């Protein structure tokens, strides 16, 4: 865009509605679509991690009940498969805890909320911009949209700075 330079010529008041519609359609609507898609993907990822973690928890509980039942019944398979029960009772919770850590570290639910809020704000601005006949008001709406996108970027940066990963030594 910088290489193109400034447009030569005059912008007349009659051109303002077409310019406002073009800005809404080419600049804001793609951002709205991106943020809505991002929110959907982050919600789905968070939900799937939650489901897998919950399944691992309940599998651990079920395995413990099976083991306790086998011990109380004096079943010979308990002695033969004791190592497997120990591995499962330690391994499944470890994997579930790691998945929970991914959910917390990734803040997928928070990212989804921020993206959805940004999409709603930009969609409202695009709607207002498409119906705006005055050039000065269209410029104000585009500045507000730029502030909304900049605010979203700042919130994302701040959220992810707080989740710095440390590599174990």
Image: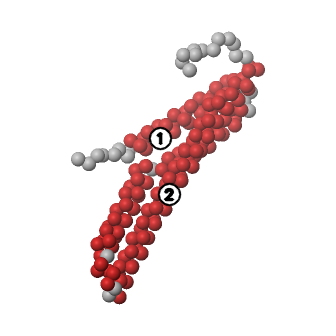
Mark drawn on residue 75: none
**Viewer-nearest of discs 1 and 2:** 2
Whether residue 61 is visible, yes or no, is: yes
* Residue that sits furthest to the bottom in the current view: 73
Label 1 neighbourhood size at 10 Å, few (<14), some (14-19), many (20+)?
Answer: some
Q: Nearer the viewer, residue 114 or 42?
A: 42
Closer to the chain start, of discs 1 and 2, is 2
Q: Check disc 1 and report the residue beneath it.
A: 155
Gap in Å between the C-alphas at discs 1 and 2?
24 Å
Left or right: 86, with 142 as reference point: left
Label 1: which secondary element:
helix
Left or right: 43, with 53 as reference point: right
Cβ–Cβ below 8 Å for labels 1 and 2?
no
Whether residue 113 is visible, yes or no, is: no
Which residue is depicted at the point 35% across and 83% down? 70
Up-down relation of residue 151 to residue 66 (above or below): above
Which residue is depicted at the point 58% across and 45% down? 37
Which residue is depicted at the point 29% across and 46% down? 167
Residue 29 at x, y = what percent? 64, 36
Label 2 neighbourhood size at 10 Å, few (<14), some (14-19), many (20+)?
Answer: few
Up-down relation of residue 166 to residue 153 (above or below): below
* Residue that sits furthest to the right in the current view: 14
Which residue is depicted at the point 61% across and 39% down? 32
Q: Check disc 2 and report the residue beneath it.
A: 48
Q: Nearer the viewer, residue 149 or 96?
A: 96
Residue 164 at x, y = what percent? 35, 44
Residue 119: quarter of image: top right
């Amino acid at each position: 865009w910088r290489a193109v330079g400034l447009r030569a010529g005059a912008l007349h008041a009659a051109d303002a509605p077409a310019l406002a519609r073009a800005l809404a359609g080419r600049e804001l609507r793609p951002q709205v679509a991106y943020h809505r898609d991002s929110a959907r993907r982050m919600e789905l990822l968070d939900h799937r991690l939650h489901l897998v973690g919950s399944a691992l928890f309940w599998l651990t509980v079920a395995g413990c009940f099976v083991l306790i039942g086998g011990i109380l019944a004096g079943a010979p398979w308990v002695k033969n498969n004791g190592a497997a029960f120990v591995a499962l009772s330690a391994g499944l919770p470890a994997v579930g805890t790691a998945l929970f850590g991914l959910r917390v570290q990734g803040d997928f639910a928070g990212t989804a909320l921020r993206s959805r809020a940004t999409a709603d704000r930009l969609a409202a601005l695009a709607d207002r911009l498409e119906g705006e006949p005055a050039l000065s008001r269209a410029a104000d709406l585009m500045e507000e949209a730029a502030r909304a996108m900049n605010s979203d970027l700042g919130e994302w940066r701040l959220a992810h700075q707080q989740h710095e990963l440390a590599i174990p030594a």
